[in-house]
Amino acid sequence: MNSQSQPNYAVNKKIAAILLVMAGLIFVSFVLFRSATDKASPTISQEVGVQQPVGDPVIAGEDGAKGTIIRAHDSEFGSMLFDGEKQAIYIWELENSTTPECYGSCAVAWPPVLTDGTPIASTGVNSALLGTTQRTDGTTQVTYNGHPLYYYAHEGPGEVKCHDIRTHGGLWWVIQPNGIRAA
């Protein structure tokens, strides 16, 4: 080896070391960014095994408890109730009071609309008709005009597939802002 090639070898080692350090910094930055964005991924509800929306359809009240947002939107059945993420809301023919009767396999297919605080009446919803009831597991279910409210587990936001559908021994209906089931 001659004397001219030795300095190039030393320079190349320094460049390689700098590139290695830069690659490490980029990798660490990627890992930190990825872990921060993973916190916004969808979650699975343990009670019913149904994927819940990424965004929280809730607002914190004065006491810090979160109330589920209920709002009215247009649909093929007229104006009806949805949650804050535009998930369709249903009532069940077999429930004639605020006492929930949908448990077990029924609640897997028809998850209750739950809240951690006072429900929030949003666009087009009559706050006087909005209420809550206790479920046997201690959770709080949202009611409207005296009826416990439910989602259908196999619908996405904005979908309304199960109006006037019979399952679990009764008909399921969408509910209008006036508190009456859609025709």
Image (cartoon, grey):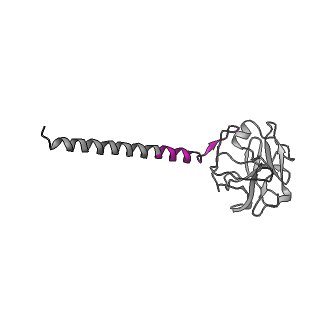
- Left or right: where does residue 32 sit relative to residue 81? left
Q: Residue furthest left?
A: 2
> Does the magenta portion include 50?
yes
Which region of the structure is painted magenta? 29-53
- Left or right: where does residue 48 sit relative to residue 6? right
Please identify the quarter of the rendering in which residue 18 is found: top left
Please identify the quarter of the rendering in which residue 99 is found: top right
In the foreground, 96 or 4: 4
Q: Residue furthest front?
A: 3
In the foreground, 169 or 121: 121
In the foreground, 4 or 85: 4
> Residue 26 at what x, y percent from top left?
42, 46
Please identify the quarter of the rendering in which residue 124 is found: bottom right
Q: Quadrant of the C terminus?
A: bottom right
Q: Is residue 183 visible?
A: no
Q: Quadrant of the N terminus?
A: top left
In the foreground, 20 or 5: 5
> Residue 140 at what x, y percent from top left?
80, 44
Name the residue rendered at 63%, 51% in the picture: 156
- Left or right: where does residue 45 sit relative to residue 94? left
> Residue 179 at what x, y percent from top left?
82, 58
- Left or right: where does residue 146 sit relative to residue 115? right
> Does the magenta portion include 67?
no
> Residue 128 at what x, y percent from top left?
86, 58
